Image (cartoon, rainbow, N blue to C red):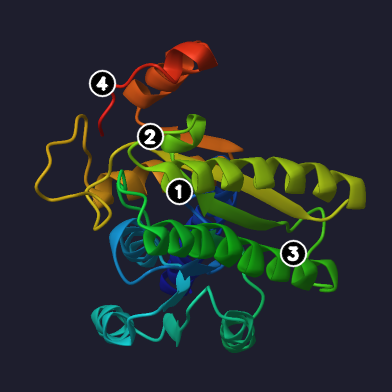
């Protein structure tokens, strides 16, 4: 009887320990956004390369279920094969085509309702020669593509019973500090990034008008080592895609409305905005 009593006591102690750990997990899941009792779901548009791919990998490391979309199917398959388990879902998507919303719907149908939609697709080149194809394709991808995807998902959330004040959908768009003002060497790129930020301001107001369960984030990086940068040029304060992904995930976890990184670019943008328009237009030494 004594031996049996000791065994029961040990079992009770172990049970109490497990219960205590469970309570701690619940507590920390509220204190730290990175810790969750449930697997979260994200869809990343533009996950074939650059920042989008780096964010996808980082979320997978944190245990997220991730849907990836982009034009280059072989790169989607490559990322899918690198992930452990069945936590990656891929769809080929060209955001400049109407079929993009069908691909988005297929991802949501396969994954279930998602917690995060990240629009990471973007193109841009320096274009002092004003090559019309470059300018128009930049507008089509950065502006038309973003509007197509983001608006469709907002309308999806509006009619879905899965979202509420307790579970809000999070939409994030990677814009750029280049959207602070027009840049003569990259007219379409800087203008489209300004449009994206302004559009998010309008959507933020509309979401409040309609009382929709949606949070918006405007992600404004400085120079990041992606395919957009000219490999023959030296850019100041360049960071890696992996480092950029860390800044983004940290900002998204805090549900920040505007995420500018790193701290040097926050100061640059602060002083940049203080330059009068007439003076900026005459600063012809600006090249990058």
Q: Secondary structure at mark 1?
A: helix
- The residue carrying mark 2 is 184
| Label placed on residue 188 | 1
> Where does the image place residue 9, in percent across and percent down from the top left?
49, 63
Dot 4 or dot 2, earlier in sequence: 2
Q: CA distance from mark 3 to mark 2?
A: 34 Å
Q: Nearer the viewer, mark 3 or mark 2?
A: 2
Q: Secondary structure at mark 2?
A: loop
Q: CA distance from mark 4 to mark 1?
A: 19 Å
Q: Secondary structure at mark 3?
A: helix
Query: Is residue 150 rendered to the left or right of residue 73?
Result: right
Query: Is residue 101 rendered to the left or right of residue 213?
Result: left
Of all residues shown, which one is farthest toward the right?
210
Q: Quadrant of residue 97?
A: bottom right
Query: In the rendered view, would you say 235 is above or below 123?
Result: above
- Note whether residue 116 is visible: no
Query: In the rendered view, would you say 272 is above or below 20?
Result: above
Q: Nearer the viewer, residue 237 or 252?
A: 237
- The residue carrying mark 4 is 285
- Residue under the point 28% across and 39% down: 223
Q: Nearer the viewer, residue 7 or 117?
A: 117
Q: CA distance from mark 4 to mark 2?
A: 10 Å
- Residue under the point 58% across and 88% down: 110
């Amino acid at each position: 009887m004594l031996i049996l009593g000791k065994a029961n006591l040990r079992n009770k102690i172990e049970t109490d320990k497990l219960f205590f750990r469970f309570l701690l997990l619940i507590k920390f899941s509220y204190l730290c956004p990175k810790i969750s009792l449930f697997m979260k779901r994200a869809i990343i548009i533009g996950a074939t390369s650059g920042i989008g791919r780096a964010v996808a990998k980082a979320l997978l490391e944190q245990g997220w279920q991730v849907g990836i979309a982009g034009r280059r199917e072989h790169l989607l398959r490559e990322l899918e094969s690198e992930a452990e388990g069945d936590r990656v879902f891929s769809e080929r998507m060209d955001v400049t085509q109407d079929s993009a919303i069908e691909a988005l719907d297929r991802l949501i149908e396969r994954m279930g309702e998602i917690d995060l939609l990240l629009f990471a697709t973007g193109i841009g080149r320096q274009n002092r020669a004003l090559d019309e194809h470059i300018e128009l394709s930049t507008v089509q991808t950065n502006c038309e593509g973003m509007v197509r995807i983001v608006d469709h998902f907002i309308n999806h959330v509006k009619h879905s019973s899965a979202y509420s004040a307790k579970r809000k959908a999070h939409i994030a768009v990677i814009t750029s500090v280049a959207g602070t003002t027009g840049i003569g060497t990259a007219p379409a790129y800087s203008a489209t990034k300004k449009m994206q930020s302004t559009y998010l301001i309008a959507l933020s107001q509309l979401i409040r008008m309609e009382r929709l369960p949606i949070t918006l984030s405007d992600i404004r990086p400085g120079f990041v080592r992606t395919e957009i940068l000219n490999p023959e040029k030296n850019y100041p304060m360049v960071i890696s895609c992996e480092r950029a992904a860390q800044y983004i995930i940290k900002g998204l976890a805090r549900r920040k409305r505007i995420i500018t990184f790193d701290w040097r670019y926050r100061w640059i943008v602060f002083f940049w905005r203080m330059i009068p328009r007439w003076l900026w237009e005459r600063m012809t030494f600006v090249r990058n």
